[in-house]
Image (cartoon, grey):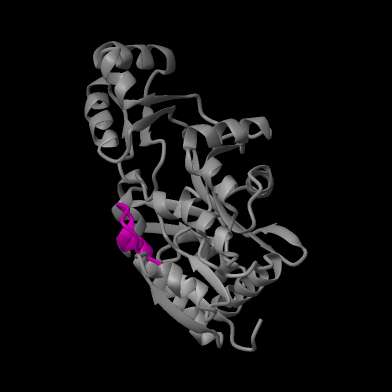
Amino acid sequence: MTLAPRVLVLAGGLSHERDVSLRSGRRVAEALRDAGCAVLERDVDAALIDTLVGGGIDVVWPLLHGASGEDGAVRDVFELLGVPYVGSAPAPCRTAWDKSVAASVARAAGLATPEAVALPHGTFRELGAQAVLAAITERMGLPLVVKPARGGSALGVNVVRTANELPRAMVECFAYGDVALVQRYVAGVEVAVTVLDLEGGPRALLAVEIVPDGGFYGYDARYVAGSTEFFCPARLTDGAADAAAAAALTAHRAFGLRHLSRTDLIVDADGRPWFLEVNVAPGMTETSLLPQAAEAAGEDLSRLYRALVEQAAGDQTAAPRTVPA
């Protein structure tokens, strides 16, 4: 590692979350420059591999949201080229990216997860939408949460409180993915817990409580300043806060994540955390939850982000950088 790490901040991509990714990239790039790093910002294109094998980059920080950045595919390319990068390895990313698979991993690790069913669009059509929806409400009742099984930024996500709302929610969900995850709604306090995994092992930061205008933490509530109120630390009892932190650490370890992660939870009236999802590429915009939690913990973001870069460089011994045949 040089005195001034050379970091490629990769942001943009072609997912529905491109705009969020670009905003995350700009914020991280600015902080890294403030920390003395030499930063190159770029999008994903056919010239990326030439840049990576050219020898001018010490570490890549992928801030791609959506499928291209969170399903492990781009990270597989980094592995092929022997390029160190910030964040989790490809296989854990693939597991976390599919929310129905992730729920199975979380349950096996002892975490509570809402009852749910994953419905591919083809199955939903072939079995008859009306009959399938009737079976869902008969089994799980209302309200429900409908979301794409693979996706982020709450795109295509709806809370369904009446049976009449369910068909429209399914149509909107399928606009963002081929598999819909329908979950039993869990009432409680919505929180996000960041885990930083640097020297000394993973540690959970204080939970951030999310209180969106209108009660639903959708896309606008996430990324339009002033649309959501945040509390850090979350307004939880000490016991509930400890349980949320423990759940995030359990998820981080169970999925085999590294460097950083963010686990989204609902803490119910009994103080029990319910696992919703774990994020391997958390948003880093001005309204994102990880930076809020880090700043509340007294972290200087520039120093923290440089530490993550240096951790990534130290964790991953780069192989010779050649383009695979």
Say whether residue 14 is left or right of residue 141.
left
Magenta segment boundaries in residue numbering: 11-21
- Front-most of 227 and 307? 307
Q: Is residue 152 above or below residue 41?
A: above
Magenta stretch prevailing secondary structure: loop
- In the image, is residue 320 above or below residue 184? below
Side of 23 where 237 appears, left or right: right
Give the residue at x 75% y 60%. 201
Q: How many marks?
A: 0
Can I make out residue 139 in this image? yes
Question: Is 14 contained in the magenta span?
Answer: yes
Q: Residue at x 33, y 34 (%)?
A: 159
- Estimate the x, y position of residue 62 in percent, counting from the top left: 48, 64
In this view of the protein, which residue sits in the foreground, 185 or 47? 47
Q: Nearer the viewer, residue 138 or 254?
A: 254
Q: Is residue 80 left or right of residue 243?
A: left
Q: Can you give x and y, in whole percent of width and height, for residue 267 in the image? A: 55, 40
What is the quadrant of residue 297 in the picture?
Answer: bottom right
